[in-house]
Image (cartoon, helix red, strand yellow):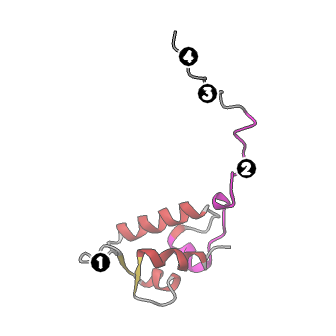
Amino acid sequence: MAPSKPEKPEATAKSISAEPASGFLKPLQPSQELAAVVGSAPLPRPEVVSKVWEYIKKHKLQNPQNRREIMADEKLQAVFGGRNKVSMFEMNKYLAQHLK
């Protein structure tokens, strides 16, 4: 008879809490400039990034020749320190400056 695999314990109320597991999921208040893009309610950092990407795609702000490049409109220029173009990798650096 082959040994059976140990069963995974059921999730308990103690393991699932109302508090986020890390500071990464802590809701942060967007600045006035960022709030023009994502809304003024406090949001976790991953949700802010998702909403910014929704905005970029909705307004077709990715460079068609280089999809890693974001061509900022007026609202995003305020977030990106006045820059017209930002790479998708630089974007998080600028977003962090607008979250408290």
Q: Residues within 10 Å of mark 2 (few under 14, many from 20)?
A: few
Please, what is the three-letter code of the amino acid marked with disc 2?
Glu
Please state which of residues 73 and 7 is positioned toward the viewer in this rendering: 7
Mark 3 vs mark 1: give the one in front: 3
Please, what is the three-letter code of the amino acid marked with disc 3?
Lys
Which residue does the numbered mark 3 point to in the structure image? 8
**Residue at x 49% of width, y 84% of height:** 80
* Of callouts 4 and 2, the N-terminal one: 4
Which residue does the numbered mark 4 point to in the structure image? 3
Q: Secondary structure at mark 4?
A: loop
Extreme residue in the front direction? 1
- Residue 27 falls within the magenta-colored stretch: yes
Extreme residue in the right direction? 14
Which residue does the numbered mark 2 point to in the structure image? 19
* Of callouts 3 and 1, the N-terminal one: 3
Residue contact between numbered discs 4 and 2, judged by CB atoms under 8 Å: no
> Disc 4 versus disc 3: distance between alpha carbons?
15 Å
Which span of residues is magenta-colored? 13-37
Please, what is the three-letter code of the amino acid marked with disc 4?
Pro
Q: Above or below — where is 16 with respect to 35?
A: above
> Disc 3 versus disc 2: distance between alpha carbons?
23 Å
Examine the residues drawn in magenta and state their main secondary structure: loop
Q: Secondary structure at mark 1?
A: loop
In which image quadrant can residue 69 be found? bottom left
> Disc 1 versus disc 4: distance between alpha carbons?
57 Å
Q: Position of residue 53 (x, y in %)?
A: 43, 66
**Residue at x 68% of width, y 60% of height:** 26
Mark 4 vs mark 3: give the one in front: 4
Q: Secondary structure at mark 3?
A: loop
